[in-house]
Amino acid sequence: MINNHKQYNIILASGSPRRRELLQMLGIDFTVKTKPTDEVYPDGTPSDKVSEFLAKLKAEAFLEESLIDPNLIVIAADTTVVIEDEILGKPKDRTDAITMLQKLSGKRHTVYSGVCILKEGQFHSFTAQTDVWFREMDLQEIEYYVDNYHPFDKAGAYAVQEWIGAAAISRMEGSYYNVVGLPTQMLYVKLSEVMAK
């Protein structure tokens, strides 16, 4: 895929600077374009399927363009943090962020990133899973992180590439980049398959 992708107009349907950096790491030329999407999933959706459902919703916003332009490829993604079947979204405020991190402290949680690739009206979706363990953190550490890093735009109120990842994550099983926001290796393989069709 290293050179194949150059014939395509690839759009990253995400405003996340982290996803943009990760896609750049794969050596892919792309533009960023987002469309307003109601990020709502049906009641009863299994927690491990929510991120993929929302990623497909984001990709669907480009369906009409995809049907017209055979060289258009859209990549959409969504990341969720799940602990004991509870989905932790983006915190509303400082108190909410602290509460989330207290829930994660000393426990294992799972990060799911759903990805949807749209090409010629066809959706190609998958989900990556990474299990993450936090050591026990005291309130002072949690407040330090929240007050210095302001993780209000991040699911689960943390970013693995910041202080908290270096100081408090004791173990991880699965893709590190998935926790950052984009499962790069799985995406690269899937994108190669989609381009080959």
Image (cartoon, grey):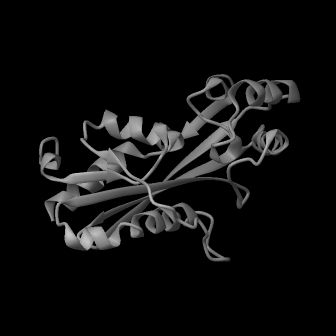
Residue 51 image offset from top left, x and y in percent: 54, 60
> In this view of the protein, which residue sits in the foreground, 37 or 4?
37
- Residue 53 shows in this picture: yes
- Quarter the C terminus occupies: bottom left
Point out residue 124 in the picture as x, y percentages from the top left corner. 33, 66
Residue 125 figure quarter: bottom left
Q: Residue at x 47, y 62 (%)?
A: 55
Q: Residue at x 57, y 37 (%)?
A: 172
Would you say 38 lies left or right of 145 here? left
Q: Is residue 38 above or below residue 91?
A: below
Q: Is residue 66 left or right of residue 70?
A: right
Where residue 80 sits: x, y (%)?
60, 54
Q: Taking 156 as reference, is 116 left or right?
A: left
At horizontal 61% and vertical 35% (from top left) the residue drawn is 159
Residue 175 visible to the viewer: no
Which residue is at the front of the view, 124 or 75?
A: 75
Quadrant in which residue 143 is drawn: top right
From the viewer's perspective, is 111 left or right of 25?
right
Up-down relation of residue 67 to residue 192 (above or below): below
* Closer-to-camera residue (2/32): 32
